[in-house]
Image: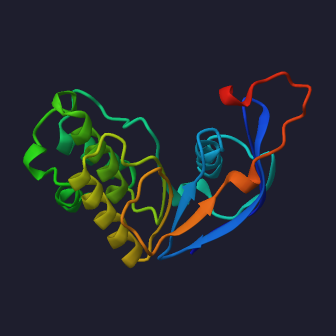
Amino acid sequence: MELRVTDLACARGGLPLIEGLSFAVASGEALVLRGPNGSGKTTLLRTLAGLQPALKGEITCPPEEMAYAAHADGLKSTLTVAENLSFWAEIHGQRDITGALEAMNLTDLAGRQAQHLSAGQKRRLGLARLLVTGRWLWVLDEPTVSLDAASVALFAGVVRDHLAAGGAALLATHIDLGLPEARVLDLAPYRAELPPDLGFDEAFL
């Protein structure tokens, strides 16, 4: 399987942000997006996930083949860790959550309500949902927010196992995940040129 992007252009708030972008990610591969704030990393991921339309270009992998994880954890606060995972597993036709609990070091927290978790524990639970989706492509926007160094290493191992099993990952992150096999795509060269008469300061884009 493969995600292929050809001559893609994306916008945020009606303003072009990325243009002329082409790349591919195949099974077993990870691609890390780089670029300063405002370079379009989140906009690109949202476009790939089908949450907003592209201005131009072609995306070959349909959104239903992707598991998208952004800044919000999307947890049900009154459900336990196990109940949250079971809810998402059932949506995706999965039943076993044991592996996901173990992979993100959540087994001992399985009976605790999400509202009583720390920020880092909530993040680990949010990421554990990836493991019960059955999706081959993980599209991740700053997945390590709120994670300590040990949890970042744990998550990197989960991504590596996903790749080894034939999955793929596309990640926007400012930190080194310890995945030397991952390719890096710098979005800065694909920044769209804004018309000079818009009157906007690009710091606010």
Count of marks overlaid on the render = 0
Residue that appears at 68% across and 67% down: 23
Residue at the location (79% across, 33% down)? 15
Residue at (12% x, 36% y) in the render = 112
Q: Where is residue 203 in the image (x, y as percent from the top left)?
A: 67, 29
Q: Residue furthest top?
A: 199
Above or below residue 57? Residue 114 is above
Question: Horizontal placement of 117 versus 20: left or right?
Answer: left
Choose top left, top right, bottom left or bottom right for residue 73.
top left
Asked if one can make out residue 88 in the rendered structure from this viewpoint, the answer is yes
Instruction: Report the residue at 56% width, 56% height from top.
Output: 33
Question: What is the quadrant of the N terminus in the image?
Answer: bottom right
Q: Is residue 187 left or right of residue 93?
A: right
Residue 92 % position (x, y): 39, 54
Q: Position of residue 139 (x, y in %)?
A: 50, 55
- On screen, residue 193 above or below 97: above
Observer-nearest of 135 and 183: 183
